Amino acid sequence: LINMSLQTSRFSVILKTSSDHEHGCENVLDGQEDTFWMTTGLFPQELVFKVKDKSMIRITKIGLLSTNIKGLVLEVSNKTQPVNFDKVLSINLDQTENKMQKELFQTDDIQRKCRFLRVKIVDGHSHFASIHKLDIYGEVEDE
């Protein structure tokens, strides 16, 4: 079991629906808790990650460090293009006053092979939400 932590050597961001030059999506990939990607005020917002090489990932669990996320959906696709996503998790997160939301998701539905991971913030506790860190645990598998 490997913690792939969405490392830039393994993943790339291929889609973002929100852009802030001071809090860009690449911050989710850097492994640091003090940097983050921030939404720009409207929902839903999403990030799509792609496995860089031709292998696939079997995700076993996902860790999230965030702020102000109310509704979250995680979807995966094993296609060669980012299409036909399957929802593996849909959850409402509690509001945390002046603290980060720290979550670990581990369900049978997450355990699927994928080339693409879509993280969708469907609603927020505030106008702005952020993702500081996304840890992907799993195994690299051949096609």
Image (cartoon, helix red, strand yellow):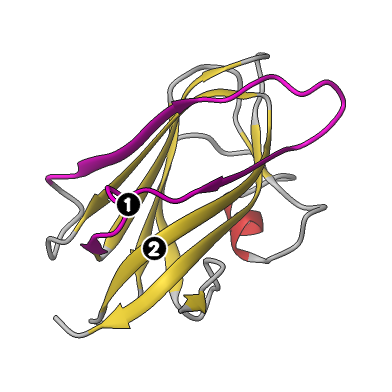
Residue 112 sits above or below residue 130 on the image: below
Residue identifier under label 2: 60
Q: Is residue 87 left or right of residue 66?
A: left
Extreme bottom residue here? 142
User: Does residue 12 appear in this view?
Assistant: yes
Amino acid at the residue labelled 2: Thr
Q: Residue 105's x, y, as percent?
A: 49, 47
The quadrant in which residue 13 appears is bottom left
Residue at image location 23% in from the left, 81% down from the top: 54
Q: Residues within 10 Å of mark 2 (few under 14, many from 20)?
A: many
124 and 59: which is toward the camera: 59
Q: CA distance from mark 2 to mark 1?
A: 6 Å
Q: Residue at x 67, y 66 (%)?
A: 30
Query: Residue 56 is drawn in which quadrant?
Result: bottom left
Q: Is residue 53 visible?
A: no
Foreground residue, 118 or 63? 63
Disc 2 + disc 1, Cβ < 8 Å:
yes
Kindly identify which residue carries mark 1: 110
Q: Vertically, is 128 above or below 35?
A: above
User: Quadrant of the image for the C terminus?
Assistant: bottom left
Residue range corresponding to the magenta coloring: 84-113
- Kind of residue sitting beneath label 1: Ile
Q: Earlier in the sequence, mark 2 or mark 1?
A: 2
Where is residue 51? Give x, y as percent.
34, 71
The residue depicted at 55 percent of the width and 73 percent of the height is 7
Q: Is residue 20 left or right of residue 77?
A: right
